[in-house]
Structure formats: C-alpha cells, structure tokens
Image (tube, grey):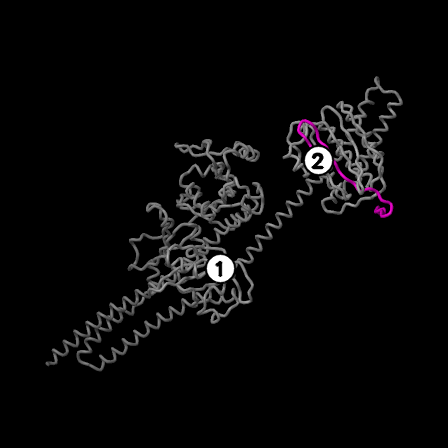
Amino acid sequence: MKPKLISGIVLIAGLLLTVLFLLFSLDTERDRLQNRLKLAGERRYFGLHEELESHFTILESLNSFFIASEKVNRKEFTVFVKPLLKRHKAIQALEWIPRVVNAERQVFEKNQQTEIVGFRITERHSQGKMVPRQSAPEYFPVTYLEPMAGNEAAVGFDLASNKVRLRTLNLSRSYRSMMATDRIRLVQETQAQFGILVFMPVFHLKPPQSSDIKPAEDLMGFALGVFKVPDLVAKAKESIQLEDSGILINLFDRSAAPENQNLYSEFDEATVKNGIYYHKLFTIAGRRWELVATADQSFLDQHYSIIPWVGLIFGIFTSFLLAGFFYIQLRTNEKIKVEVRNRVQELRNSEVKTKKILDTALNGMITINSKGIVDYLNPAGETLFQYRADEVLGKNVNMLMPEPYHAQHDQYLENYHQTGIPKIIGFNREVIGKRKNGTEFPMRLAVGEMEFGGIKTYVGVILDITEQKAAERDLIASKELAEEANRLKTDFLNTMSHELRTPLTVILGNISDLTDVDDLPDLEEIADIAGDIQKAGDHLLALINDLLDLSKIEAGKMELELHQVGTREIVGNSIDTLKILAERKGIKLVDQVMDHTVAADPIRLKQILMNLIGNAIKFTDTGEITISVEPTAKEIMFHISDTGSGITAEDQEHIFDPFRQVDSSSRRRAGGSGLGLAITKKLVELHGGQIGLKSTINQGSTFSFSLPVFQESNHEDTGR
C-alpha cells in the first residue's frame, strides 16, 4: 500500500476518532452540568420544602391553640399570631374561620358586633359587592384576621359562598388534614404576585358523645393562612450556597387547571440552555407541586470547560501527526485514556460530594428499599436514634418504630406496592420514633420515592419535634393557669355580692320605717326595729369578717368551729331575721322545729338556714314557708318547704352548681349571683352532712339537709 494512502487512511481514522472524542466530551460535559444542576435543584427543593413546612407548621400551632381552649377571643388570637406574622414575612395573613350552623347565626353575629360594629356574615354579589349571606345550613365566616389593616372588607365573608373555597374546605374536613387552594392573585401587593390559601381543620379535642350528633359536627372551624409564594421562594434562597448562583426556578401547581398552574416563574421554558433542567414533583397540603430548575448563562459560564474544544484541536493536530508518526499516535491514545479516567474520577468525586452533603444535613435522613430494608442512615439520623449506621444497615426499618407501627409497617409497603395508593409516601406526618435504648420521641417524617436503574428507593427526612411539643404543652399549661386565676377572681367577687345582699336588705328595709319624722313608730316598735337592724348588722359584720374564709371552701382549707347548737334557737333566730322580708310579700313563715342538738358551727349553720329560707322567700309569691326538723339516730334532717313555682327536673341537676340560676321568669326577677346554693352545699358537706331537693312545678320545693347529732362522749371543740 502506498505511503500516501496509508497516511490518508491514518489521517481519516484520526479525524474520525477526533470527532467521536468531541461528541463524547460534549456529552460528558453536558452530564456533568446536568449533575451539578441536579444537586443545585435538590438543594432548592429541600430549602423550599423545609420553608413550606416551617410556615405550614404555624397553622398546626394555631390548631393546638384553639383545641387547648374552649373559646379563643379576638384579643388572644391577635396576641398569638402577631409575633408569627412578624417573624414570617411570607405570611400575608392568618385567619380564624369558625363553623357556624344556621340556628346559631343571629347569636354569632350579635356577639361579634360587640367588637366589630355592623358585623354580618356576607357573600359576594354578582357585581362584586358584599351583601348579607343568604340562608344556608352552615357558614364559614372570616372572624379573626391579622393584619386587619387593608383586610377589613374580608371580615364576615362566608368562604362557603365561594364554590372553589368550599371545595377545598370540604376536602380538608373530609380528610381531616391541611389543604391548600389553587393560586390566588394577591391584590394587596404592589407587584403582581401569586399566593395560596391553606386551610387547617380544627376539631374538638374529644368528639361529641351524643348519638344524635353527626361525626362531621366535631369540626370547630379552620385556621387559614394566606402565603405569598414569591416570598416563600425568596426565604428558601437565603440558605442556598454561593455555588448555586445562576440557577433559575419555576414553580407549578399540577393539581390546578393548566391556565392556573404557574405559581412562580424566573424563566421561559423555551429559553432552557442546552436542554439542561431539573424537576421535582412533591405533595404539599394536598396539592401536587412541581419544581423546575434550569441554568442561566452565568451558571454555564461559571462551570464552562474548554476541554472538549482543546481535544478537538488536539485531535486534528494529532491526526495529522499520526499520518507520519505512529509513535505520536500511541502517545495521543494514552492521553485520551488519561482524560477519560479523569472524567470518570470527576463523576466519582461528584458522587462522594453528594454523599457528604447528605452526611452533613442537620435533619435525619434514611433510605430503604422496596422491602423496608435500610441502606443508608446519615449522622444526624444516628444521633436521633442513637444507633451507629452499621447497626441499622441491612435491617428492617421497623426496628426504629414502636408498636403498633413496628408490626404494621411491612403491610403498609405491601399495600402500596399492590394498590399504588400512597398513604405515607409523599406526605408529611407526625409519628413516633424509638431509640436504641427503647425510649420514644415525637418526630415529623416526610417520605419521598425515587427510582434509579429500575429499583425503587424511599427517602425519609426526619425532624425531632420534642422541643416543639414541649413548647406547645407549656403554652397550654400557661393558658390554663391564667384562666383558672381569672375564674377564682370572678368566683370571689360574685360570692361577696351575693352574701352581703341579704343582711343589707334587712337593714335598709327596717331603716325605711324610721325615715319619716312625721310618721315614726312608737318607742317599743322602734326598739324592735333597732333590734332587727342590730341583728342584721351583727350578721353582716360576721359575714364581712368571714369573706376571706369563703375562698378557702374550694381550696379545702375551711375550718369549722363546732359547738353544741340547739335547733329551735338557731332556726328561731334565722326566722326573726327574715320575718320582715316574708311579711312584706304576704308570706307566712311556719316554725315546726322541735328542740334537738347538733354538732355545728353556729355562724355557718345560720348562714345555711338564711340562704335556704331567703331563697324560698324570693321564689314564693303566695302561701307559706315551713321549717321543720326530723331526728334520726345519728343525724338531724332540716326541711325548708315553700309553696313557690317549683323547679324543673332539668334545672334540679344544676341547682347547686356555682353561678347557676334556673331559667323561669320568677327567678330572673329574684336576681342573685348564683353562688348561694353552691356555698350552702359546700358548708353542709364540710359539716359531714348532705343536701338534697324535691320539687314539683307550680306546687313548691323542699330543700333538706342533714347535720350530725351532737354526742358528748366523742365530741371535741375544734375551734382554734
């Protein structure tokens, strides 16, 4: 073969090899850039996902806040959410949306009007104007809202009047979990931005037990958060490393209609450089979102490599040399092998770097295969579970779970493989983990699914929420302490009002007979009146001296000074004190008391009798009140019977409860703080006795209580 032909063949072969090398290098370079973009995209995904979880956790805190209290007022809501809004700028607003049934609408609107003038449950008219809401079985009005400035028009708006909002409300209620809406345009912002509404259903801590209450009626309402998507993305970017500069992202809601899927956009998909991009589908608040990332020119410039083009020039040059110099050809081939090894090493280094990123993550990360076998646990996970990675790798992940999760986990995986319906995968859940020493701890678990080489792997991100749970418990305990202190203060003030009224009434009623100089009674009657006033005044003074002791009843620290007390004397004194009140109403007080002795505190026994006789006078318009006693072997039964209107069976169940008054019109006219019978019951029980009631509507009532018989042989004066 001629030298020219051999040189031509060698040259052509060299040029062909050079072109192939260029294509190989360009593909390798593209794969390298794609891997770098994937890592950057993963960091953006994890940053965004963590930021979303952090913000959505606020709604869970609101859920705990409302569950912890029977009723949260507007001031408490404002105090709770203002610091959250200040710390989280991506939150446009936080709202409380209670469930109001139609029967409670008028009362609900009236209660809200005490704080917001003109408050009404409204809906949007076809012309955009807010009008009163038409009648519906239930409403979900915006009630508490922060910040209020700029959002006043939203207060009272019934979200159930909007079909789109109602659909999300019903989904959230049905699944009893957090749900987000399609995108909304935030008209309050100076620039066009998209946001989302996230509903968190709030259910009663214990579902209603009554069989006539439907399960759906344990819903209290919804905690609503309005979140600004651009601000969430911006917040997530703050923690991104410098090497991720030049990454552009788009965010889509794939659960929405095509025209409403775009949530956030930094690039036009038509401008994707060299087809390099990264995308991640994930589920958040019941929505299927997709994160798409690509590189701009600055990213390509930053990671640009001239090696392929150097190889091209070198290959051409080498091809010409190969035509005459076989030795140079051999050396060139060796250099190519070295370059290939370098590229492979770079890929290996990239894999090691990825592993190091996972190893340095602050949250625990674990991966398992389709059989539930652990194949990776990062250092943060080792710290959480107190296992070394080599103690967990190759073993079933259920070793990290307490019962019943331990026994059920394999079945969860099997059901998912058979049905394809995820119940854990793709969701963020609060679960319980088990450490090596057997202790359990609360954690938040987010499980994702990936497939590589036809093999499915499940990736779990774990966050220890022990401190968060402790903070929630502390918040609930603080609120309960504050409510208890407020209740005790109210109890004390109401008790004082009730207990001072009766003796004051006696004093004022008698003084009125002495105010007319021209019509004064005779001296004997004046002396009687003065005596009544003296008795009432003495009793009033005794009550004032003992007011501080009344608070000891609930605390169990009330001390009685027991003496031998004659029933006729103590009942007679009580009747004499209240006789004038009875005579003014034309009611006769009938004393049928035989003389017996009981072991009692005289002041407290008189307080018991005056409370019961005084109540009988208040609630009896005609007839008589009979006071009698009935002796037994160990106790004396006192009976106070009236001919009043009686008490219904329903009201009898609560007659001795503090602050409770029966609901008939006669009792409304009589007034009172509602503490008299409650205090009377406590005093009787402190004496070791019991109190009861028998009543018939329109016929009268009989209050009966027992006191122990005074026994000289075993009685000791307990006064101090």
Q: Is residue 147 at all visible to an observer of this figure? A: no
Residue that badge 1 annotates: 405
- Which residue is tagged 2? 693
* 164 sits to left or right of 81: left
* Residue shown at 76% from the left, 22% from the top: 586
Q: Position of residue 462 (x, y in %)?
A: 48, 60
- Observer-nearest of 225 and 506: 506
For label 1, the SS is: helix
Residue drawn 44% across the image and 57% down it = 47
- Say which amino acid is labelled 1: Tyr
Q: Secondary structure at mark 2?
A: strand
Task: Tell me which amino acid carries mark 2.
Answer: Leu
Residue 702 against residue 254 in the figure, above or below: above
Which disc, if any, is residue 452?
Answer: none
Q: Residues within 10 Å of mark 1 (few under 14, many from 20)?
A: some
Q: Which residues are the magenta region?
A: 694-720
Of callouts 2 and 1, the N-terminal one:
1
**Marks 2 and 1: which is nearer the front?**
2
